[in-house]
Amino acid sequence: MNREDLKDYKYTQMLIKDQTEYIETQKETINRLNSIISDMPKGSKTAYDTEAEKLSELMDKFNELMNTILEEKRKQEKIVERVNKMEFPYKNILFKVYIQGKSLVTAASEMNYSYRDLCRKHGIALNIFDEI
């Protein structure tokens, strides 16, 4: 876990959101295929096998995506734990900039620091993050 992981936090959030939406569409497809398979007459074995294969492939992809999402979520939890181990104001700076995705200018304004002062503290905060 390094500062690059911290910097990628907001992009990982977007990835998780996009993959979750994709999973929802895949769940609809899986449910639709399940209903097709259960409604098929017993005599059409080839059609049943084809639909069952599609369903199996979708389930495998679904499970892979879920594992990816869970892995990314664990990584994000570790990042937040690491930030929370820091002292104030460094914890606040990293939380605002990386977890909440705010710019340094916005964070400086919210924390009543000058931009230059916040940039200096931000550098210190990143160094502390690397040491934890």
Image: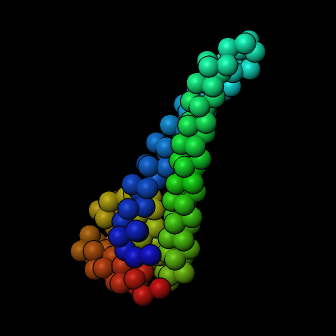
Q: Give the x, y percent position of residue 24.
A: 57, 34
**Is residue 118 left or right of 31 when viewed as pictured?**
left
Picture quarter containing residue 46? Answer: top right
Residue 62 visible in rendering: no
> Residue farthest to the bottom?
131
Residue 129 visible in rendering: yes
Q: Nearer the viewer, residue 110 or 43?
A: 43
Q: Give the x, y percent position of residue 102.
A: 37, 58
Q: Look at 41% across and 68% down and name the residue there.
A: 6
Q: Look at 44% across and 49% down and name the residue there.
A: 15
**Is residue 46 left or right of 110 when viewed as pictured?**
right
What colour-coding does the image apply? Answer: rainbow
Q: Look at 42% across and 81% down and name the residue there.
A: 129
Q: Give the x, y percent position of residue 99.
A: 45, 62
So how many labels did they put on this image?
0
**Is residue 4 left or right of 31 when viewed as pictured?**
left
